[in-house]
Image (cartoon, coloured by chain):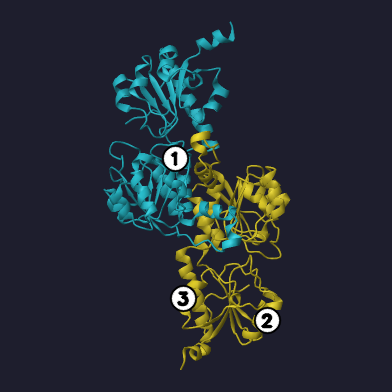
Chain colours: A cyan, B yellow
Amino acid sequence: MAAEDQAKELPQVLVLGPPSIFPYLESQFSNRFLFLKPWLSKLPLTQFLTSFAQSAPALLIRGGGSTQLTSAILDCLPSLKLVVTSSVGVDHLNLPELRRRGVAIAYAGNVLAEDAADMAVGLLIDVLRKVSAGDRFVRQGLWSRKGDLPPGLKLSGKRIGIVGLGKIGSEVAKRLEGFGCKVSYNSRTKKSIAPYSYYSNVYELAANCEALIICCALTEETYHLINKEVMLALGKDGVIVNIGRGAIIDEKEMIRCLIQGEIGGAGLDVFENEPKIPKELFNLDNVVLSPHVAVMTYESSMELSKLVVDNLEAFFSNKSLVSPFVD
Amino acid sequence: MAAEDQAKELPQVLVLGPPSIFPYLESQFSNRFLFLKPWLSKLPLTQFLTSFAQSAPALLIRGGGSTQLTSAILDCLPSLKLVVTSSVGVDHLNLPELRRRGVAIAYAGNVLAEDAADMAVGLLIDVLRKVSAGDRFVRQGLWSRKGDLPPGLKLSGKRIGIVGLGKIGSEVAKRLEGFGCKVSYNSRTKKSIAPYSYYSNVYELAANCEALIICCALTEETYHLINKEVMLALGKDGVIVNIGRGAIIDEKEMIRCLIQGEIGGAGLDVFENEPKIPKELFNLDNVVLSPHVAVMTYESSMELSKLVVDNLEAFFSNKSLVSPFVD
């Protein structure tokens, strides 16, 4: 049997995005799945799907931000029974439509939580202590010409508010305890086992904290949750770190607050229209800009690759998904 | 009495460096001390000292790096009885000479330990997770043009070696425990109360760790302690963070190792000849360069200012120093 015929018998997996782990997956698992890669085709996406993905039962998609699973895409995929997203967030998946169509969902589960928490703390230290700004200062030769960089702000002992105390938020809290920080949180419900102060609304949390770390999912309820009032409550030395989704913050308002000194700084791994970023942010020294990499390290990309493949294998063997997403 | 005559009766404090907190000290305490400021004079330093500082009993000096208390300087200060350094390190003070002359020393003690530890962890996360490199990537507009930044390395769970488990090193260890790191250390003697693995030599520590954090003092014993052999033992993914003193690392060798990929990266707050930095470092993406600010935040500079003044007041009132440096 020719290689081409063999490939045709492999289970079809449509790939959208593609996820950053895809080159690795393709190099390792092309003998187990037939990956359909619309970005290599000159056809418009829906035309590619109609032509080549009609019978694809599984879809692998990258995390939100730039890639949305629209109804128009789903309409071209009548055989779809599984969506595997390489992300923790599922805001890009069009959940009501998937539910209506009876499509199962697998997601990244908890394998990325430690990395996300590490990065959240890294961004917080970076903004407070001006690490990236200091690196720019040195590389531009300003240290020997201009003398001391003005000092940053202390992290140890600070009152930090975590928005969303799920797996990632809890990992952030654990790390901040090591810095002697006083951790509070806001979430839909009070967590009985969490030893931190609970605020039922984010405005109160901001008013009682010196930094907010956004760890929640993007939903209808959290869209622009961090609005002007919350930022003003946080105050002029207050810092926001966002490792959730860009649209949880009213980005336009945040930029205004940053420029006018109504908040102190921001560490942003996610943006409303990434990878397009408002130009105004590029000129600010009190922000740290990160290209949506909070959840991704070499080590976790290996773990995530295994998880994605395990979910696909389970699906194609009629077994239970390894990391199903359940509302 | 004229203001000038009043000033003449204030206790004289010669200032060298000056420390970064000096503008604040001057603004607050010029009514309590007569600060002698040689950097404002056109005279060469020794000539200034001989002309104006013959009777100065106290000296305030900034931390090492660019400022050294040489014998030539001390020879011009026959009345000197106290040196107050605004730093934790005392490597710039010429200890044998001060001891021989019976000059007391006050230093920053522990007020900067938390900040130093926060920064050490921040630099470690930054190098592993490419925070500053990611910020450059985004600001240069590469995210939307080039796609994903290659992933960094995971911090959680890593084996981290601390060189020097004093107050700062212990604070670093405490923070790293929150990240699930396995902490080991090297110091002159095993600390009976520390719950971490002890290595009696730094080569063995490097061979068993994925990152080294330099927290020790610069002494004759620690000069170029981190040499080629130690770096090769740390290995090609290994990371070095230095918040101690530049000369604890063989900087030339480190740069060679960084360029040739024999170590993975470095987060450097201190340098051998700061603020002059080897140009080769500016072109490396696997280093984070920080202008010797690990111990300094707005909050700690206020604490340090109080400590400096308290030491000066104690000295001029014939009381015990608040934070004497004892070998």
Q: Secondary structure at mark 3?
A: helix
Give the CA distance from mark 2 to mark 1.
Answer: 62 Å
* Residue in view at x 32 percent, y 31 percent: A327
Disc 1 marks which residue?
A113
Which of disc 2 and disc 3 is earlier in sequence?
3
The residue under label 1 is which amino acid type?
Ala
Of all chains, the one bearing label 2 is B
> As rendered, which of B146 and A79 lies closer to the eye?
B146
Dot 2 falls on a residue whose secondary structure is helix
Query: The N terminus of chain A appears in which quarter of the rendering?
Result: top right
Identify the residue position indicated by label 2 in the image. B47
| Residue bearing mark 3 | B27
Callout 1: helix, strand or loop?
helix
Q: Chain of mark 1?
A: A
The crowding category of the residue bearing disc 3, from other C-alpha atoms within 10 Å (few below 14, some 14 to 19, many at least 20), is few
Q: Position of residue A316 (x, y in %)?
A: 44, 17
